[in-house]
Image (cartoon, helix red, strand yellow):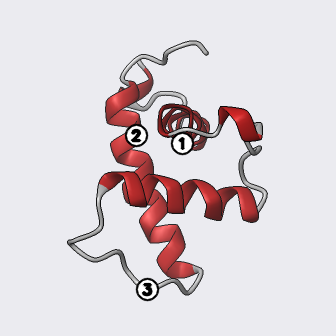
C-alpha cells in the first residue's frame, strides 16, 4: 500500500464529503458522539455498497486500510489542481 501525500488531510476531506453523501442518500447525520473509527467504517461500507469503491479483501479489512481506501476515493474525486493533491 503506497502512502499518499497529505493522506491525513485527504481522509478528513473524505469524511466531510462522505457525510454529505450519506445525508443525501437518506442516512441521518452522524452524532457528535460517533467516533472517527465508526464514521470511517460506516462511510467505507456505504461506498462499497453503492459500488463507488472496490471492497477490500476480508482479511485486509481493518481501520488502516479503510482509511487509505477513503483517501484514495476522495483523491480521485477532487480536481487535478486541488491543493491537497500537490
Query: Total number of numbered labels?
Result: 3
Q: Residue furthest top?
A: 2
**Residue, disc 3:** 28
Instruction: Report the front residue among 68 and 14.
Output: 68
Q: Are marks 1 and 3 in contact (CB under 8 Å)?
A: no
Judge from the rendering whether residue 28 lies leftward or rightward of residue 68; answer left or right.
Answer: left
Which badge, 2 or 1, comes first in the chain's sequence? 2
Mark 3: give few (<14), some (14-19) or many (20+) Cα within 10 Å: few
Mark 2: give few (<14), some (14-19) or many (20+) Cα within 10 Å: many
Instruction: Report the front residue among 82 and 37.
Output: 37
Q: Tell me the number on the disc at residue 9.
A: none
**Residue, disc 2:** 11
The structure residue drawn at horizontal position 74% and vertical position 65%, both measured from the top left corner, is: 50
The structure residue drawn at horizontal position 42% and vertical position 16%, both measured from the top left corner, is: 5
Distance (Cα) linking label 1 and label 3: 20 Å
Helix, strand or loop status at disc 2: helix
Q: x%, y% of residue 34?
A: 29, 67
Distance (Cα) linking label 2 and label 1: 6 Å
Q: Tell me the number on the disc at residue 70.
A: 1
Amino acid at each position: 500500500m503506497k502512502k499518499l501525500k497529505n493522506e491525513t488531510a485527504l481522509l478528513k476531506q473524505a469524511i466531510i464529503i462522505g457525510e454529505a453523501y450519506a445525508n443525501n442518500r437518506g442516512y441521518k447525520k452522524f452524532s457528535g458522539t460517533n467516533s472517527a473509527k465508526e464514521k470511517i467504517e460506516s462511510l467505507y461500507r456505504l461506498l462499497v455498497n453503492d459500488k463507488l469503491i472496490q471492497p477490500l479483501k476480508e482479511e485486509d479489512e481493518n481501520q488502516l486500510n479503510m482509511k487509505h481506501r477513503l483517501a484514495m476515493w476522495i483523491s480521485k474525486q477532487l480536481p487535478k489542481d486541488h491543493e491537497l493533491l500537490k
